[in-house]
Image (spheres, rainbow, N blue to C red):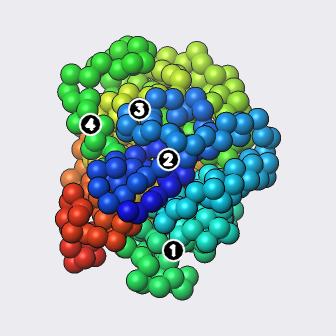
Amino acid sequence: MHKSLIVFGTRPEIIKLGPVYQALKRNNLCEVHACWTGQHVELADGLSEVFDIQIDFTCDDIVKRVGLTEKVGRMLEFLSQLLNEENYDSLVVQGDTASAMAGAIAGFLSRTPVAHVEAGLRTHDLYSPWPEEFSRRVISIAGSKHYAPTEAARTNLRNEGISARNIIVTGNTVVDAVQFVRRKIKSSYTPRCKELLNIPSNKKLILVTGHRRENIGAPFLRILDALQQLANDGDKCLVFPVHLNPEVKNAVREHLGSSPNILLVPPLLYPDFIYLLGRAWTVITDSGGIQEEAPSFKLPIIITRETTERPEVIKAGFGKLVGSNTTQIVTWARMLSEGREPTRLPFNNPFGDGNAGERIAADLIGDRGQSHLNVSDAQIALI
């Protein structure tokens, strides 16, 4: 019986590890435990229930720690103790968060094989995004299994000397998550956030998010100026779920709080967010996760970052990298809106087919014949 520990602590990690957890749970050759570090609290509200994740271990006091160093230190202490008490065949982390890095380091130091979901993303600039680019490189050094979402991610890992036998291209588990939640809410869904019921049906809905550390300050104010100009056009409604970071929240409230055609809402439950993506005409975002989610809805994405570790979204035709340039944000949004209804782009999703979780579980357990999906090595390699 394979025994696996999944470590996560943020909203994106629940979303992207939910399909892996579900696939492992379905397999009768695996015992899976979930460890919640508590890196996000309000932002992750209700998500474990959406994906039916049973939390076995919780690092309760992490939110009391000030700064990344203190948080990572506490997580390492907690996870090291847990790994010394339990004997796991694998420790699974996702992405590039502090929780994922702490999990990978703790796993490596305890000689527990580390499996990295969404491995191989790179901007090749250690400070953009910060500290995520550093974290993902550390995880790759500590990792034993590297589940790359795309062929480009696999190439990055190979260029860093990681053996091809330890890399599998699986697709991105966020596609699994989006498909799962879309099936759950279907077409008759009523949002839990009642403010979303006030979105006018005669205006083009732009979904906006913004929270990156490197944008806080002058870059973020330039982005807010662009949003104000777009709202003033009159034919658009901008819906902005505002991040809980005080610097972000205060700037948004101050500059957009009284603006017509802008709806500021608190962080949304994931089903509400998927509902919004289904209604949106385009997305303006600095989020890496949304760059992966929007292609499932065939949406164009205006990316308010200087770099992206997801070049596939641009290559596939979904994304435009504009940074915090006010003129470019406004120009691209207006260009998209000229003379057409809400857009659905005719491109293939570069992030897979929605079966990544099953592929990861099958490989992790080491018996593809028992997989619910029952995919072959050749099929995995062709994703």
Q: Three-letter amino acid code at disc 1?
A: Ser
The disc, 3 or 4, on the residue closer to the chain's N-terminal end is 3
Point 43% across, 52% down: residue: 32
Q: Earlier in the sequence, mark 1 or mark 2?
A: 2
Disc 2 to disc 3: CB gap under 8 Å = no
Q: Describe residue 171's horizontal placement relative to residue 231 as left or right.
A: left
**Type of the residue with mark 2:** Ala
Residue that badge 4 annotates: 182
Q: Is residue 351 left or right of residue 340?
A: right
- Look at mark 2 in the image and give the residue it sits on: 34
* Residue holding disc 3: 49
Q: Which is nearer the N-term, disc 3 or disc 1?
A: 3
Regarding mark 2 in the picture, which secondary structure is present there? strand
Q: CA distance from mark 2 to mark 4?
A: 24 Å
Q: Which secondary structure, mark 4?
A: helix
Q: Earlier in the sequence, mark 2 or mark 4?
A: 2
Judged by depth in the image, the label closer to the viewer, 1 or 2, is: 2
Q: Dots 1 and 4: beta carbons under 8 Å? A: no
Of the two numbered discs 3 and 4 in the rendering, the one whose residue sits closer to the viewer = 3
Neighbourhood count class around disc 4 (C-alpha, 10 Å): few under 14, some 14–19, many 20 upward: some
If the image is split into quadrants, where does the N terminus sit?
bottom left
